[in-house]
Image (cartoon, grey):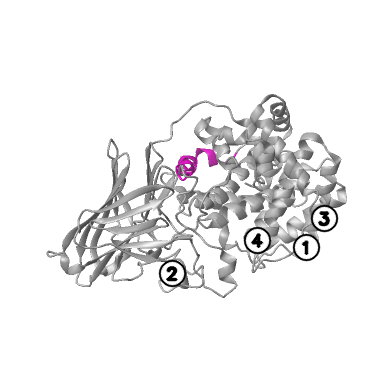
Amino acid sequence: MSVQYLKSHLRKSHPRLVLNSSLEGMVRKKIKSDPVVKNYYEAIKLNAQSILQKPYLQRVMTGRRLLSVSREALYRVNMLGMVYRMEKDPAMLERLNNEVLAICDFADWNPSHYLDVGEMSMAVALAIDWGADKLPATTVEKAINALITKGIDPSWGNDGKNAGWAYTGNNWNQVCNGGMIAAAIAVAEKNPDLAAKTIKRALDGIPNALAAYLPDGVYPEGSSYWEYGTGFSVITCAMLESAFGTDFGHSKHSAFMASAMYRVMMNAPSGYYYNFADCGDRRGKNADTELAWFASKTGNKAFFEKDRLLMPAEEMSPLTRIGGAALVWVAQYEEKQGVEVPSVWYGRGDNPIVIFTGDNGYYFGGKGGRATTNHGNMDAGSFVFELEGVRWVIDPGNQDYNTLEQTGFDLWNSRQNSQRWTLLTKNNFGHSTLTVNNQLFIANGQATLVEVGEGSQPSALFDITAPYGDFLKSAKRTFTKDSPASLVITDQIETSPKTEVITWQLMTTAGVEIVNGGAILRQDGKTLKINNLSHSDYMLSVISLDPPPLALDRRIKNLKRIELIIPAWTFKTGVGEIKIRLAAE
């Protein structure tokens, strides 16, 4: 990307961000001819109408973030702007104009937390691009100046050096570089030098974010952050394609494209996510329009949630903040293949994952990984398990960042002695794994996926030794789906001189009855038996975690930890096995 390339390849006419003249015509035709596109557009219109009743945005911080305001700005522009493009409704244009003026009057867009700037910059860039034919010239000029002074310039700093997020391997890269690409295209005519160097930095940096998906598509930050980071990647692709005629290689990145199936596999039959890392508990009822972009590129109907897109528009929740732009790739979808969702799926990388699915709502998700992965937890070896719509084994999920930060809590430090690891949602005491000597995991200890066996009784072997440091010589955990309604967890243990006690843990919100040889779980009129196959002479115990140990812990109704405590001396030769079977009653 150079000034010369920019001038010769950038589309001159507007719109050119996500939409261009040919795409706009295609979408209008699809609204008339395609029931799915028509219905989804009706939802956009309803969202846009609701915005007309809201007060204009103000620069109101939430803790250290302006992010909620930036996100609302991006949402409003997406809804208002898309309706304006499709219908040239003057009420939408007037409101779009006033939204832009309000945002550009902010003193700044909070550059100390650059996600805020990235999202706000994208909002303003889309607004003036989509409204360029009729917005007052004074508004466009004001917006371009704001994009330079409040958006792009702070990204270079006073010394002209790159911001830390520009080349990082997490969602900040995707969001901030996406916002800067949008801003740079919007200001290209006024300042081509600044635009070219900003787009060049983004194109150089983005591959570092895509590398996080390697090798198989697992997004290490979890499903919620897949939606966030990947959502900005797909709208960035759409902007690059509409403006330059190429996405500069995104759609040829095998791991990035493979992440669509990862996203599908994170959705359990119960409606919950496999919510490892800092992930929300469950998905909403709307269609996954980020996933629909992958459907538009591959033609794979597994990625196109047609039934949800056809839900009556008035029954949909508010759309996502890139939901207006998503109309374009929803309209671009043409079914070309029907790749079935696999019954065994796995992905390697920083946070290796294995999923088993089956009849009767069978769903198992297990993982390796390390706590120092971005948004990671001390959850190596942990798992979730469902049958017949009941989540029997849970992950405690995420909790509100700002509530913790306002107390001065050191949430984002991932060093071994960080406060982060005092929280039940973050440490190993809140996950269904092994704990040794009642100690925290080694934060940087990486648990790996060794092998996956498919067939009638699929299995997955994880080496989870590293998180235990010198408290164990070796720990290998195997998950086996030994029948359509059961799961076996087998731990092969080799103790060290420092091993004192090993605690097998299972997190649940079910009712628990301890019985000889295990326990019976009851929930929603159904039962699950925990069979203690290896240590039947040791009783399970139950630790109530409602209320949780700390005032700052997330409170989860009926949360409890089932424990099997095994002294190290019972492994006479230093080697032993713990084997537990979960089976429907």
Q: In the structure shown, which secondary structural element does the residue marked by tag 1 occupy?
A: loop
Cα distance between the residues tagged 1 and 2: 37 Å
Q: Which amino acid does label 2 sit on?
A: Trp
Q: Name the residue under label 1.
A: 106
Q: Is residue 69 visible?
A: yes
| Mark number, residue 155 | 4
394 is higher (above) or lower (below) than 23: below
Cα distance between the residues tagged 3 and 1: 9 Å
Q: Disc 1 or disc 2, which is closer to the eye?
A: 2
* 310 is within the stretch colored magenta: no
In-image side of 249 versus 125 (left or right) = left
Q: Mark 3 points at which residue?
A: 101
Is 131 or 80 nearer to us in this picture? 80
Q: Which amino acid does label 3 sit on?
A: Leu
Q: Mark 2 points at which residue?
A: 421
- Residue 103, horizontal then vertical, whole percent: 77, 57
Q: Quadrant of the C terminus?
A: top left
Mark 1 / mark 2, whichever is N-terminal:
1
Q: What residue type is labelled 4?
A: Ser
Magenta stretch, main secondary structure class: helix
Is 150 or 521 nearer to us in this picture? 521
Mark 2 / mark 4, whichever is N-terminal:
4
Cα distance between the residues tagged 3 and 4: 22 Å
Mark 3 / mark 1, whichever is N-terminal:
3
Q: In the structure shown, which secondary structural element does the residue marked by tag 3 occupy?
A: helix
